[in-house]
Amino acid sequence: MCKHQPLSCIIPPYMNLKLANNEKFEKKLLAAHVSSFTLDAQIRGRRKAFTRLNPQSKEIVALAALKKPAKKVAVSREVYTAGNKQVQPGTLVRKEGQDVVKDKDVNNVYDAAGYTWDFYYSLFGRNSIDNKGLKLIQTVHYGKKYDNAFWDGQQMIYGDGDGKIFDSFTLDVDIIGHELTHGVVQYETNLVYQDQSGALNESLADIFGSMIKQRVLNQDAASADWLIGENVLRGKQYALRSLKAPGTAYKNHPDLGTDPQPAHMSGYTNDPFDNGGVHLNSGITNHAFYLACTEVGGYSWEKVGKVWYAAMCDKKGVQPTASFLDFKNATLTHADKLFKSENTVSKAIKKAWDSVGVE
Ligand SMILES: [Zn+2]
């Protein structure tokens, strides 16, 4: 397709016309060529192109036009402040379309929610968390020096951090993407927040949070840092988690010690204080995603990310109490479906899961 450089197309229109009128093609293939042809024609401003199609191909164009959504799809955001009290949503400070305000935390979460919405909509056609245009409601300055951020099932909440160990939880796009992805999971596979399904829930939030940041920074899998929360946890050498090297996000931190996340099933832990280790064992599945992305190359969201999204939304293949192995199997099924002609994708994904001991 030559959307971006209409003057340097390698396939000339006469070839596309032949393909778009080929009666020997099966329906799907024909539809693909008709769509290529009409897109090219549209780009080149050739309104007359349609008249040159035969009736069967004209019908495909007409049906495609009918399928187009009539309603305008757009992000809808509201940011509130709790004024350091434990109230929600609090006082409205900025809503959709309004200019930046003085409060940086408000602007941070407004922007990051926009990046997150755009990530899901542009890449997967998903309209907000529930895929029905849910308004993204966020509250900043929750509580006094509150050291956390969360999705409460209906909205996002961010603390200011204590100012010593943690800065404001609005500083990292990946954290905001992480929390909003918990919302997406809730509306899809609804993974139970306990043991392996809980670790998968945490891991999906990290993985999509990281991809959202990578897309904002235009980083491919090889150049991304794969860190979560490097601004929120104070100190240049520290971050909350690393998908590239779980267990190294912070080392010998004066207050936190060393990142305890395992990167392999041999380090699997049943921490009862963390719902069976949901924030710990997520390191194993996070690392599998990282390995698959770097093996395939390019942007994480182009291939492996697409497979993970399909698995995250696969309510049949991934039950609420799914295990790591169930999720692995779902990714392999979707890799085969999505990238039939490129078995390098499913091979890389299988290799990645095997390397972290999910076999
Ligand atoms: Zn989380």
Image (tube, rainbow, N blue to C red):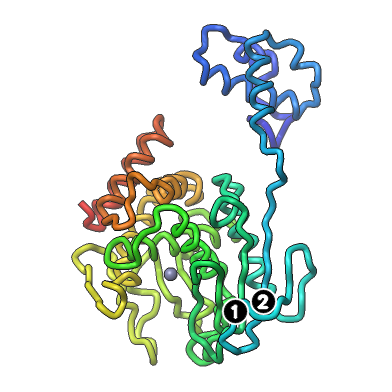
| 139 with respect to 205 (left or right) | right
Residue position for label 1: 88
Q: Quadrant of the N terminus?
A: top right
- Disc tally is 2
Spot occupied by residue 143 in the image (x, y as percentages of width and height): 56, 88
Q: Quadrant of residue 167?
A: bottom right
Q: Nearer the viewer, residue 17 or 319?
A: 319
Is residue 315 positioned above or below 186 on the image? above
Label 2, label 1: how far apart the Cα atoms are: 8 Å
Say which label, 2 or 1, has the lower sequence index.
2
User: What amino acid type should be assigned to the residue bearing mark 1?
Assistant: Gln
Query: Which label is found at residue 231?
Result: none
Residue at disc 2, CB closer than 8 Å to ligand 1: no
Is label 2 or label 1 in front?
A: 1
User: What amino acid type should be assigned to the residue bearing mark 2?
Assistant: Tyr
Report if residue 264 is visible in the image. yes
| 153 with respect to 66 (left or right) | left
Is residue 1 positioned above or below 79 on the image? above
Helix or strand or loop: what does disc 1 sit on? Answer: loop
Residue position for label 2: 80
Q: Residue at x 58, y 59 (%)?
A: 116
